[in-house]
Image (cartoon, rainbow, N blue to C red):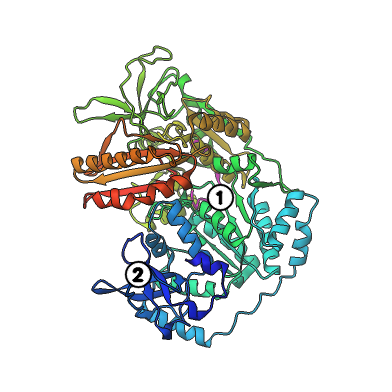
């Protein structure tokens, strides 16, 4: 295995008699042995792709280790080496192996995801470059590097630790406390310059295209041709040659989105994760990894420091700081947190008209800003089936007694209303009377952006009003045109979902109205409070960069929720302390791990049968003494959902010792579960999901 090669890099070429190979074109979670011809023994290495005979055809495989002896008789020969130089070094191979084990997917799938897409012509061009290229020269330290070292050696003990970890290449996790964009960038620059001074490389991750461009533009001014912007959306050929240049140490710094964590930096010295709380770091396709988790593992393997940053840390990171697993960085020149002076929470239960979408106060604020020739943004998060019910009089919202998740409002085929928990499957009849205050004014809440647009147009018929969401945007150009029109002040009121907040200029925006915090706050997801807090905090932080006096009005039927109380008072700890108490009581992350498993297919009976087989398998594992304690939700009250003619069963596993659980779970999983799965059914396993629905 490659761990052996990592331990003993001086292994003699004569010992490379057999290669351990993972097939890349077939989703097998199995290692195959092949004999290495004498003429290839000096050329082959871990991470090299090869062509091998498999059954009656030729397949591509990846070499993951070497053996002097094989237990397999009559091993077939490797036919050809594809790569003159291996794409993945032993550290990256070790990382891909860990990903396959932690995220419960095949090593083959993980390697396929990590390897850059290639063509024969590109490989020939690469081979010519290997022959003609000179060894990379060491980068010259910038003039300001000496200064940066001195700045990093402040009296602050944590800054000294950051300094030492970079210089001595030691694994340690740091968290840069909330600060403004300018101070954050200055700190990043100091750390990067320090890495450069000892000839080390840096990987910087950002969650989205907007953040990537914004941060890259600033760093490009400082580091010029020493920094590469790696965009996974570029064409495959461009990505392939960028990968090669990175491997040949042509750049000191690479900045990119989540997949950039796999780039082959041979002299890695530091990893930076910007906006670490963002759910976009989670890959929704196999291998369904979380880039922050993978980055921390890579930093551990490579023995380098990692710096995380966000103005609203994830609960996992906050708990890490509480336990001292993550060291907080407090900048000595950090400006105190300043929320906008005008930050209002509107209690919608006090409104005279319960059917109105816009409160009287928000309506007046919009009118006032229009008179001043200012722009307005109205934000409304809309999720299709995630409607819920609430009492118009007291704001009561029914929750699952077992999971504390909001019960979702559903119609069945007979048009009978039911309340259902998306986590455990608990079903309840629709309420006709509020159990808290006795009012009969209890109804579903689920206002869409289109309805909001119609109401705003009636209120302000003379204003230029546009809606920006996935329904109104058909092409990429439509989005760019609308953002451009807003920035040129051709739009007075912009109504939109989260996508409307990206790329806008807030210079002439003095009012942002969050029309319903409840549509975020009451999603059937244990992270709904955290996501609401982070999103609203992000909006407020964006405004603060321009003018601290900008006005934010938040409408809600639940003004006493700890998330909104914390935002109103400007005290983050109110939210984090209460949220951690709730998570601990109900055994949710960061106090446990969650595995979400979905069985999908077009045939309802076959989906149900496969789900029951999976439940039986988990039951067998649970009876084993070596199996760590876990909880299975959704098995007793199994719900079969239907959407777009696809049936789905969802199961939730809660487990604390996830690595031990995963090892035992996968031991006979292929034979007992996958081999019995109906051909047209699909099994989706998501470890540490960021979305529960």
Q: Residue furthest bottom?
A: 132
Q: Image height check: is 164 above or below 48?
A: above
Tell me if mark 1 has few (under 14), some (14-19) or many (20+) residues whose alpha carbon lies within 10 angstroms of its own: many
Question: Which of the two labelled residues, at mark 1 and mark 2, occupies the earlier sequence position?
Answer: 2
Question: Number of marks in the image?
Answer: 2
Q: Nearer the viewer, residue 660 or 565?
A: 660
Q: Residue furthest right?
A: 155
Q: Is residue 51 left or right of residue 303?
A: left
Picture quadrant of residue 10: bottom right
Q: Nearer the viewer, residue 408 or 495?
A: 408
Q: Image height check: is 689 above or below 631?
A: below
Give the residue at mark 1: 275
State yes or no: residue 241 in magenta. no
Where residue 585 sits in the image (x, y, percent)?
A: 51, 28
Q: Nearer the viewer, residue 673 or 405?
A: 673
Give the residue at mark 2: 72
Where residue 403 sits in the image (x, y, percent)?
A: 42, 29
- Secondary element type, mark 2: loop
**In this rendering, the label closer to the viewer, 1 or 2:** 2
Where residue 207 sits in the image (x, y, percent)?
A: 50, 53
State yes or no: residue 511 in magenta. yes
Q: Quadrant of the C terminus?
A: top left
Where residue 336 sits in the image (x, y, percent)?
A: 70, 41
Tell me which segment is drawn in magenta.
Answer: 502-513
Instruction: Estimate the spatial distance between the alpha carbons at disc 1 and disc 2, rounded to whole Å.
Output: 49 Å
């Amino acid at each position: 295995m490659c761990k052996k090669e990592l331990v003993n890099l001086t292994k003699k070429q004569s010992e490379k008699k057999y290669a351990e190979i993972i097939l890349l074109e077939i989703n097998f979670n199995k290692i195959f042995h092949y004999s290495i011809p004498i003429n290839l023994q000096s050329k082959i290495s871990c991470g090299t792709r090869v062509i091998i005979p498999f059954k009656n055809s030729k397949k591509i495989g990846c070499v993951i280790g070497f053996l002097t002896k094989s237990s397999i008789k009559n091993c077939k020969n490797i036919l050809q080496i594809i790569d003159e130089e291996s794409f993945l070094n032993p550290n990256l191979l070790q990382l891909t192996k860990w990903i396959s084990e932690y995220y419960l997917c095949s090593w083959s799938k993980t390697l396929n995801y990590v390897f850059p897409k290639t063509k024969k012509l590109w490989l020939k061009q690469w081979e010519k470059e290997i022959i003609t290229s000179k060894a990379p020269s060491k980068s010259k330290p910038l003039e300001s590097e000496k200064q940066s070292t001195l700045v990093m050696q402040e009296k602050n003990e944590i800054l000294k630790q950051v300094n030492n970890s970079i210089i001595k290449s030691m694994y340690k996790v740091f968290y840069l406390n909330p600060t403004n964009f300018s101070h954050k960038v200055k700190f990043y620059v100091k750390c990067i310059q320090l890495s450069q001074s000892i000839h080390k490389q840096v990987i910087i991750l950002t969650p989205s295209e907007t953040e990537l461009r914004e941060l890259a533009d600033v760093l490009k001014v400082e580091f010029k041709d020493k920094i590469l912007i790696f965009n996974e959306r570029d064409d495959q050929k461009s990505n392939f040659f960028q990968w090669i240049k990175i491997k040949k140490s042509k750049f000191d710094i690479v900045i990119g989105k989540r997949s950039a964590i796999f780039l082959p930096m041979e002299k890695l010295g530091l990893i930076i994760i910007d906006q670490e709380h963002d759910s976009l770091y989670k890959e929704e396709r196999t291998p369904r990894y979380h880039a922050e988790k993978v980055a921390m593992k890579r930093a551990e393997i490579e023995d380098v420091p990692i710096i995380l940053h966000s103005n609203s840390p994830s609960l996992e990171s906050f708990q890490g700081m509480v336990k001292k697993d993550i060291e907080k960085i407090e900048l000595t020149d950090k400006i105190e947190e300043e929320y906008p002076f005008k930050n209002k929470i509107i209690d919608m239960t006090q409104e005279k008209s319960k059917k109105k979408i816009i409160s009287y106060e928000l309506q007046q604020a919009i009118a006032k800003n229009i008179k001043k020739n200012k722009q307005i943004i109205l934000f409304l998060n809309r999720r299709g089936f995630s409607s819920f019910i609430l009492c118009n009089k007291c704001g009561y919202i029914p929750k699952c007694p077992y999971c504390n998740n909001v019960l979702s409002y559903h119609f069945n085929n007979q048009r009978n209303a039911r309340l259902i928990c998306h986590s455990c499957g608990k079903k309840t009849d629709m309420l006709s009377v509020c159990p808290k205050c006795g009012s009969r004014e209890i109804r579903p809440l689920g206002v869409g952006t289109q309805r909001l647009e119609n109401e705003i147009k009636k209120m302000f018929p003379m204003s230029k009003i546009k809606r920006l969401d996935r329904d109104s945007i058909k092409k990429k150009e439509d989005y760019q045109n609308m953002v451009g029109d807003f920035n040129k002040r051709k739009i007075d009121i912009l109504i939109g979902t989260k996508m409307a907040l990206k790329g806008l200029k807030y210079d002439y925006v003095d009012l942002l109205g969050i029309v319903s915090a409840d549509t975020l706050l009451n999603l059937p997801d244990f992270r709904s409070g955290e996501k609401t807090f982070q999103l609203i905090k992000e909006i407020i932080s964006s405004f603060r960069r321009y003018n601290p006096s900008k006005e934010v009005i938040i409408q809600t039927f639940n003004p006493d929720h700890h998330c909104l109380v914390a935002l109103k008072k400007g005290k983050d700890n109110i939210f984090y302390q209460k949220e951690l108490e709730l998570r601990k009581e109900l055994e949710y992350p960061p106090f446990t791990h969650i595995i979400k498993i979905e069985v999908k297919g077009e045939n309802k009976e076959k989906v149900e049968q496969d789900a029951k087989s999976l439940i039986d398998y988990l039951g067998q594992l649970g009876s084993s003494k070596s199996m760590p304690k876990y909880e299975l939700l959704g098995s007793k009250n199994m719900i079969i959902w239907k959407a777009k003619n696809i049936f789905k069963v969802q199961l939730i596993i809660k487990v604390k010792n996830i690595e031990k659980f995963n090892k035992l779970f996968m031991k006979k999983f292929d034979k007992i579960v996958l081999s019995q799965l109906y051909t047209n059914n699909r099994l989706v396993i998501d470890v540490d999901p960021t979305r529960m629905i």
